[in-house]
Amino acid sequence: MKKHILFIINPISGVGKKNILPDLIAKYINQSLFEYEIVFTQHKGHAEELSAQAAEKNIDVVCVVGGDGSVHEAGKALIHKKTALAILATGSGNGVARHLKLPLNLKHAIKRINDFNVKKIDTVLLNNQPFIGVAGFGFDALIAEKFDQYHNRGLMSYVRLVLKEIRYFKGVNIQINQRKSTENILLCCIANTSQFGNGFTIAPNAKVNDGKFELIVIKSAHIFTLLPLFVLSIIGKLHWSKKVSIERFKEVNIQLKTLMCHLDGEPQEEIQENNQVRIQPQSLNVLV
Ligand SMILES: Nc1ncnc2c1ncn2[C@@H]1O[C@H](COP(=O)(O)OP(=O)(O)OP(=O)(O)O)[C@@H](O)[C@H]1O
């Protein structure tokens, strides 16, 4: 029997045109193995609704065509479900797809789906909100919020926003597991996967199926610390910096003074001061 795929295309993700995708899918998906449907999202949150319905119907694969925000929406609806998540990376950052070493070339990415190689990965719960890749409470949360309202997408939009906002960023205060509080933090990230996207590696040793997440704290928000950190991030050696601490946890408590948070690059509205973070081992089926 053929396996059933629902392709969910986010038309506003990244910078490329998405109307070529139905033809590309028809050309490269193995139609003797798969039958499929294609839906374009109409609004924020739509990918989550469609994925939840697909999981209810026991559809074999939801293939999200978008960036980390789309992966977040579709992925969280598939946690602890049989339906597997596939990704065609058309977003601005594509951190999860890059971590999983999925092809960024769409032809090759569609052909990879034909292999039907399913792997179980961990996901993370922040209070009762799940995420797949990286979450954060610092400068990254501010950028996620600004990017969400920005008129353009793509890497250059991220660069413009970072250069503009870093000048005014004051740092945030946090407390981890009731230890003494740490002030003037640039980033406090929880990483299940290794990068924000575009090769910006925040957790060089993060593994997506080891039953743990990494907690990364970068201690200074001063503008002059940014360039060396940027270089170390690009070469995947952020842990070499004395400003960076990385610890691995199954569960951690984080107290926040600043109420800013993103999950997989999606800014959150309901943020708590007291945050319990917990790994959900092997909770999501993903095509790799
Ligand atoms: N039809 C739509 N109209 C407006 N927003 C949409 C629509 N479909 C999805 N969205 C929203 O688009 C946002 C951005 O999507 P996504 O994250 O996939 O792309 P991106 O931001 O370009 O990539 P990345 O997250 O990798 O940087 C998400 O918040 C998603 O909810």
Image (cartoon, rainbow, N blue to C red):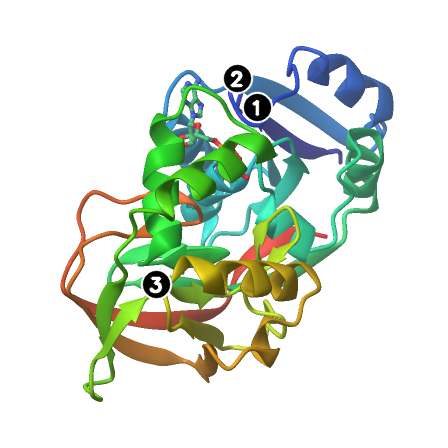
In this view of the protein, which residue sits in the foreground, 166 or 5? 166
Count of numbered tags: 3
Image location (x, y in percent) of residue 157: 51, 31
Q: Is residue 174 above or below residue 75?
A: below
Q: Is residue 8 above or below residue 120?
A: above
Picture quadrant where residue 129 is located: bottom left
Residue denoted by label 2: 40
User: Residue at coordinates 40% horizontally, 73% vertically from top-left?
Assistant: 217
Q: Which amino acid, mark 1?
A: Ile
| Disc 2 + disc 1, Cβ < 8 Å | yes
Q: Which amino acid, mark 3?
A: Leu
Residue denoted by label 1: 9
Q: List the single residue furthest toward the front.
A: 224
Instruction: Find numbered disc 2 in the image and state the secondary structure of the residue it sits on.
Output: strand
For the residues marked 2 and 1, what is the alpha-carbon distance in whole angstroms?
Answer: 5 Å
In this view of the protein, which residue sits in the foreground, 103 or 282? 103
Q: Which amino acid, mark 2?
A: Phe
In this rendering, position of residue 259 left or right of residue 195: left
Q: Is residue 124 above or below residue 264?
A: below
N-terminal of the pair, mark 2 or mark 1, is 1
| Disc 1 + disc 3, Cβ < 8 Å | no
Q: Quadrant of the N terminus?
A: top right
Residue denoted by label 3: 125
In this view of the protein, which residue sits in the foreground, 220 or 224? 224
Image location (x, y in percent) of residue 223: 42, 57
